[in-house]
């Protein structure tokens, strides 16, 4: 992973964490008596990791396609899909939404498809990293019954 890919990934995670991590925020003084659901932190973090690795993978695929390697087009498309559903799942899981389980089912399906496509490109590290993060996300989705 080059510096640009790493910064894109970190930026994606930071942006999503800022918008979806409110449920994980520390207690504020004077609000200790209020109970706020903790959400499903492991699921949310796994989904956000998928977003980050997908962002880096998409960048890699675009670079390679620009050099003439059109074989990565399917991989880039799947990574884009997984990025979108995982971003939604990360938000829902962090808020302990009633839709989390339903979204986790869809996300697990998209992650399974993405993992299959990305694993074909074992010579491309960003593709393999996306494949691995998809496997972890699938595991977390299954833990809540997806």
Image (cartoon, rainbow, N blue to C red):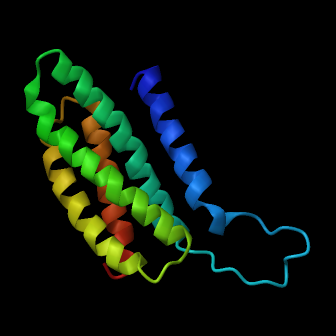
Res. 142 visible in picture: no
Res. 115 visible in picture: yes
Residue 57 vertical placement versus 44 (above, below):
above
Q: Quadrant of the N terminus?
A: top left
- The structure residue drawn at horizontal position 41% and vertical position 62%, both measured from the top left corner, is 88
In screen coordinates, is 124 left or right of 116? Answer: right
In screen coordinates, is 42 left or right of 2? Answer: right
Q: Quadrant of the C terminus?
A: bottom left
- The structure residue drawn at horizontal position 14% and vertical position 52%, both measured from the top left corner, is 116
Q: Residue furthest top?
A: 67
The location of residue 81, given as percent across then percent down, is 26, 52
- The structure residue drawn at horizontal position 18% and vertical position 29%, both measured from the top left corner, is 123
In screen coordinates, is 98 left or right of 112? Answer: right
The location of residue 23, given as percent across then percent down, is 64, 69
The location of residue 12, given as percent across then percent down, is 49, 42
- The structure residue drawn at horizontal position 69% and vertical position 80%, both measured from the top left corner, is 36
- Of 137 and 74, nearer the camera is 74
- Of 144 and 28, nearer the camera is 28
Residue 47 vertical placement versus 73 (above, below):
below
The location of residue 16, given as percent across then percent down, is 52, 51
């Amino acid at each position: 992973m080059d510096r640009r890919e790493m910064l894109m990934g970190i930026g994606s995670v930071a942006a999503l964490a800022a918008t979806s991590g409110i449920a994980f925020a520390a207690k504020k003084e004077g609000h200790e008596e209020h109970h706020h659901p903790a959400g499903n932190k492991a699921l949310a973090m796994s989904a956000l990791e998928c977003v980050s690795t997908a962002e880096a993978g998409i960048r890699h695929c675009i670079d390679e396609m620009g050099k003439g390697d059109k074989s990565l087009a399917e991989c880039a498309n799947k990574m884009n899909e997984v990025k979108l559903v995982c971003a939604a799942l990360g938000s829902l899981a962090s808020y302990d939404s009633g839709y989390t389980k339903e979204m986790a089912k869809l996300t697990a399906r998209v992650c399974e498809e993405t993992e299959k496509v990305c694993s074909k490109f074992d010579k491309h590290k960003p593709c393999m990293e996306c494949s691995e993060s998809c496997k972890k996300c699938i595991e977390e989705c299954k833990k809540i019954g997806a």
